[in-house]
Image: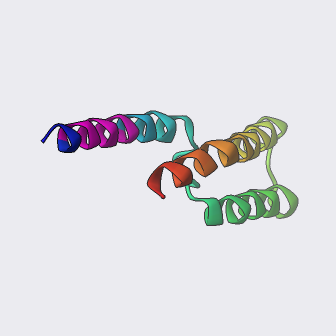
Amino acid sequence: MKLREEKDRQIGELNKEKEKLLKLCHPTYNRLEDLEKGVKIINKRIETSTITTKQERELISEIKKIEESRPIIIKIDKIQA
């Protein structure tokens, strides 16, 4: 019985860690396969749209946030495995 309780506690801790990491990720592109897609979409918008300098800075900031999510998403994938 104690072994089961210990496993349940470990699972609970891992789920809490996963939830904490998910909050640090980009809200839309939060899966590894979506990261590159998101960067491409935003880059295309920068290249093909008529946008202000402020909007361009915001989009570049968005790209940085997506790229910063990569190591966090890798950690989440390891927790899920």
- The image shows residue 32 at horizontal and vertical percentages of 63, 60
Identity of the residue drawn at 33% across and 38% down: 10
Identity of the residue drawn at 80% across and 37% down: 57
The number of numbered discs placed on residues in the rendered structure image is 0
- The image shows residue 5 at horizontal and vertical percentages of 19, 38
Out of 37 and 7, give the one closest to the viewer.
7
Identity of the residue drawn at 51% across and 37% down: 21
- The image shows residue 2 at horizontal and vertical percentages of 17, 37
Residue 9 appears anywhere in the view: yes
**Residue farthest toward the left in the current orientation of the protein:** 1
Quarter of the image for residue 14 reads: top left
Out of 42 and 67, give the one closest to the viewer.
67
Residue 44 vertical placement versus 9 (above, below): below
Residue 28 appears anywhere in the view: no
Magenta: predominant secondary structure element? helix
Q: In which quadrant of the rendered image does the N terminus lie?
A: top left
Drawn side of residue 69 relative to residue 3, left or right = right
Out of 45 and 80, give the one closest to the viewer.
80
Drawn side of residue 73 relative to residue 14, left or right = right
Quarter of the image for residue 41 reads: bottom right
Q: Is residue 12 magenta?
A: yes
- The image shows residue 73 at horizontal and vertical percentages of 59, 49
Q: What range is drawn magenta here?
A: 5-15
